[in-house]
Image: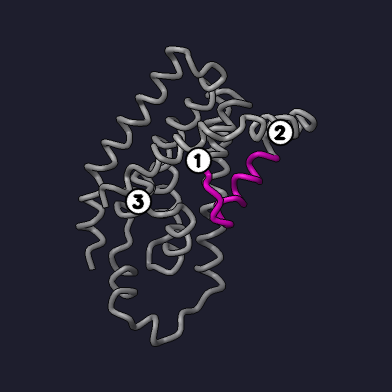
Amino acid sequence: MKKLCLVPIVLFAGMLFLNLDYFHNIEATLSKYSNIAPMIYIVIFAVAPLTFFPSSILVVMAGRFFGFGWGFVYTLVGALLGSSIAFMITRGFVTLPKYIANNRQIKTFSDKTSFKVILLMRFVPIIPFDVISYGAGLSKISYFEYALASFIGVIPGVVIYTNIGAQSFDLNSTSFYIAVTALVVFALIMSKLASIIKVKLDY
């Protein structure tokens, strides 16, 4: 469990090896349609997690293009929209077969999924964003509790990744090193919280 908390650092390290042209191309597209760039980004971010695309890459890009403040705001809106869509898909259109619904682990998941559990799972992203969203839709948690927990839970991660994007124009700057250090500290905190989640979801 704790090893999985290194995922954000590994992902970010991998992104350092990506050609920055990837980000520039996206930025060029947003620049071309600058009047509706926020709307385009929000829609992309809302849909991307549904395809299991790593949303953290988009958050970094938002920090680069919109700056920390607006990148943070637009990402939160996109995250809430995307998580709501996934939740509603399984809540409204998916009916589990009886032999699955009566499975002990499935029933335990449904009973244990609460505001606190969703909040912890969002804060400690060791489970893919969209998997949590789809799974919550199959549980007994209300949409309001789910949406509020999701909104609050993603804030720390969005702050970290948006800040990295905003500072990534100069990889040798002190502010960029501070942003990376914040990511490392965040990962260490997640490793501590992972044990809590393991207890909460220990079937």
Q: Position of residue 57 (x, y in %)?
A: 54, 39
Q: Which mark is residue 199?
A: none
* Label 2, residues with CA under 10 Å away: few <14, some 14-19, many ≥20: few
Identity of the residue drawn at 57% across and 35% down: 18
Q: Position of residue 128 (x, y in %)?
A: 44, 54
Question: Is 110 rendered above or below residue 46?
Answer: below
Identity of the residue drawn at 42% across and 62% down: 136
Question: Is 99 rendered above or below residue 2?
Answer: below
**Label whose residue precedes the other's in the sequence (2 or 3):** 2
Which quadrant does the C terminus fall into? bottom left
Question: Which residue has dot 1 on it?
Answer: 56
- Separation of residues labelled 1 and 3 (CA atoms): 15 Å
Taking the view exactly as shown, the residue that stands out farthest to the right is 32
Whether the residues at callouts 1 and 2 have beta carbons within 8 Å, the answer is no
Magenta stretch: give its range: 40-56
Looking at the magenta stretch, what is its main secondary structure? Answer: helix
In the displayed structure image, the side of residue 108 where residue 28 appears, left or right: right
From the viewer's perspective, is the residue at label 1 or at label 3 nearer? Answer: 1
Q: Nearest the camera: 114 or 162?
A: 162
Question: Which residue has dot 2 on it?
Answer: 25
In the displayed structure image, the side of residue 172 where residue 38 appears, left or right: right
In the displayed structure image, the side of residue 120 where residue 21 appears, left or right: right
Q: Position of residue 143 (x, y in %)?
A: 45, 58
Q: What kind of residue is marked 3?
A: Met
Q: What kind of residue is marked 2?
A: Asn
Whether the residues at callouts 2 and 3 have beta carbons within 8 Å, the answer is no
Q: Is residue 54 magenta?
A: yes
Q: What kind of residue is marked 1?
A: Ser
Identity of the residue drawn at 37% across and 30% down: 183
Question: Is 5 rendered above or below residue 13?
Answer: below
**Label whose residue precedes the other's in the sequence (1 or 3):** 1
